[in-house]
Amino acid sequence: MATNTGMDEDEEFVTLRCMEDDVEGDAEDVISISTADIYRWDLTSILTHRIVQIKANRNRIIQMSSYFSGLLSGSFSESCLDLVSIHWNAQSFFSVLRFMFGYYVEITSDNFILLYEAALFFGVESLLLQCQLWLSEVTSSKDPLTPKLQVDALIRVWNYGVEHANDLILHLCTSYLARNLKWAMLCDSFLDVPYQLLNTCIQHPELTIDSEKYLCDAILLWLAANIRKKTIEDGCTGMLRQIRCNCLPLWFLAGKRRCCFFAEFADENVDAILQLAGHPSVDVGNICADCDLSCMQIRLTEFTKKVDLSGCPQIRPILLLSLLPPLYSRDIMERKKFKRPLLNLQYLNVDHLPTLTFEAVEEVDISNCPMLDLEDALKCFSKSFPSLRKLRAVNYVDFGTEKLIRLLARFPLLCNIDLTVDVSPLIPAKVSVVSSQPALSPLGSREFPNDDHCPWDALLSNMSRRQLSNITRLTLQGRSDIADSDLRKITKSCASLCYLNLNGCMSVTDSGISFVILNCILLRSILACDTYFGQESISALCSGVHNLEDHVEPQAKKPLHSFASKFHTLHIGGCMGVSEASLSELLSQTLMIKSVSLRETHLVDDALDRFPGCSLEMLDISETKVSSLALAHLIHRNPGLKCLKARGCKHLSLNFMDAEGREPSNLAYSSTELHSELGKSCQLEEIAVGWGFSFFSLESLKPAIRSLRTLVVGLGGSLGHDGLRLLPAFSPLLETLMIYFQVISDSLVINIMKTLRKLQVLALCYCFGQISSLSFQISMPNLRNLKLERVAAWMTNTDLIILTQNCPNLVDLSLLGCRLLNPESQDIISCGWPGLISMHLEDCGEVTAHGVSPLMNCRALEDLLLRHTGLESL
């Protein structure tokens, strides 16, 4: 509401005649209004008139506007007039006028420039200040997930600042883009960012990115769209030199060797990274001599929340150099003080060196950095990243539980740790391990001091007596070094644990897992696929939580709920030690479960029917005996299901017969009706199917798969020609497509390549029909993972070259049965995909007949499988 809108009858007033520049002065379309009624103005109606005459308080506009002050109270001829003509944008002038009379004016990215320009012209200093404060506020937002100024609006504001040489606007725009570059590069308008703005941004001290690879991608993406502009060609090299190649992941840098803008930089720095990774002390010694250390420092600012160093084998010396004060980077004499200890470092040592502190950093990823000692890196982080909450350190094999627990005290806020070892889990042995630690107390006698007190009481008492860490999520997937004794130590040290991932931990026993379940009273998620999870763990999950009221006698306490009733995630796929009856009893108590994996277990309809939950989001029942009827009933009760994996479930097919050749009675509910239920109830993001899935199933699923990201069709499924043809129309957002044993053709594959432009993973395995090189002559720049198994027997070196040209960004390649390939194929692969991380070549002619030297040019290769590819392979 206006604070001063009225005018006394005796007050002086002036009539402001507002019109656009192109309106004739004698136009008849005129409306008269007064500032006395400003709070009732209907701007939509007023703006339909070409000329607007406004009766305004002379003293008020003189007081609020330097323009009107000079015009109406100075020596100008207009100062004694009662009518003043205003040639200005009507909407912005009305907003300025309303502001002058105390009315609130909302500033947005759409009207900022108009308001700012009008406030500047009419000299309304208070509105000008409001505009500046608004721009300062929206450009200083510290939340990277919800930027307040879109890129197209940022460009408009920047251009206005350039045109009017407004240093404040230019500074605010540059710092805003520098802090939000990772978000901005994903916007369509990013390619329209002016060269001067981007170039200033990448040199700005507040440039904030998780990883140097995002800066590299942003520059290359922008250059590809703008390189033809004459003004850009001269500055191209300068922009590329701003990229700190020494801080890029090896696989990423190697993959850029094919980029026309960046090939030379990539070639030079791949060798430098490998040398630095192999001999860090020597190279750092040379660097310390006389060069600028900024090229050897990761970008850290006061706004940095996440640091992603994954895949950087050279990171050991770079990490320490990045955390030293700026003085060491600039001053040669200061650098000599730490040169000697740095040269002798076998591990990071920051005890005697000053380091910077970055309070905003909450997440660090140092996965796949084999030359970095994890323990010493964490010591470094504890000094520089005191607010660290999440640590991801995948593939650090030599890091025991004792070290982990010892370091927890260094990070008071750390709550999420991922120490995954990326190996395929072993199949559980038929002879189970009773216990991997003899000292582990057996279940039922858990060292509680008084038998009169229930385990729950004792645990609460223990919690009050000792200092515990804040770890709530712990991932130990694939770590075969974790034993029952380690679980015991973790349980004692991490009483706040809510989530534990033990997938593939083959050294822990059923007894060890049950100990964790009983003693981590806040545990709500356990992932124990391919482990010895069995009857003891089931018993622990089904055991009761007792009433804790003090006035209730111990013998009168009754179980209220089981541990399982409060669980959100239960993954026990591949755990064959669980009987049908036990599994049924367990599922009957999982009231709040959201994610469950029961693949390759003794799961039958009875267990699924007893499941009472209605909050399921993820369900994996692959390779089980579940029928369409039981699954349909469960889906009907769980409309929030987003992920369904049901490959290898033969009972879902009407064609399935039992051992005696009879069709089971529970198949009366057809698979088509099952998929209709899915289509009516769910919005799927991922689905893996096989038996019982057909083109008609796809049609039934149409409403549910509009937002589908991943589709896997395996043995027993039959999409047919029409299914594969319509798939891109049904699921245009697909990112992963894997089809096995389907009928395919060139026209179908070409249609998929043309229309699924977001596709990142494509697997065509053991499919029928005829395809040729024509299928892969469509450019797929987003494709990262390609698997062609027994579908490309026609592939020659020429076809392979075409494939490298149209799928240039592959990091994972698997070829099986390409028997026409020869030793020259290695050069084609290494030159065409220099950034490959994983390569599988099986039954591929004589690819390795002359050795494998050319493949070594794939410098980032981590996973290499060569089978039946030599002289005898044919």
Image: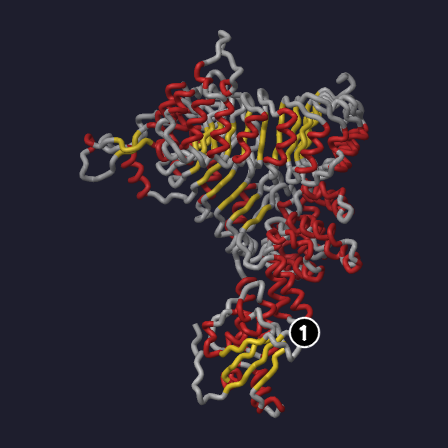
Name the residue beneath numbered marker 1. Answer: 22
Whole-percent x, y for residue 410 in the image? 46, 47
- Observer-nearest residue: 511 or 210? 210
Residue at figure coordinates x 65%, y 32% from the top left: 762
- Mark 1 neighbour class, 10 Å CA radius: few under 14, some 14 to 19, many 20 or more: few
User: Compared to 143, does 848 lie above or below?
Assistant: above
Q: How is the image coloured?
A: secondary structure
Left or right side of 423 for 497: left
> How many marks can you see?
1
Residue at figure coordinates x 75%, y 48% from the top left: 262
User: Compared to 804, does 337 lie above or below?
Assistant: below
Q: Amino acid at mark 1?
A: Asp
Picture quarter with the N terminus = bottom left
Residue, far top: 660
Whole-percent x, y for residue 94 in the image? 55, 73
User: Compared to 58, does 305 lie above or below?
Assistant: above
- Observer-nearest residue: 152 or 805? 152
Picture quarter with the C terminus = top right
Residue 39 is drawn in which quadrant? Answer: bottom left
Left or right side of 670 for 222: right
Whole-percent x, y for residue 824 in the image? 81, 29
Residue 613 is drawn in which quadrant? Answer: top left
Query: Label 1's element?
Result: loop
Viewer can see residue 326: no
Residue 73 is drawn in which quadrant? Answer: bottom right
Whole-percent x, y for residue 626 in the image? 46, 21
Viewer can see residue 794: yes
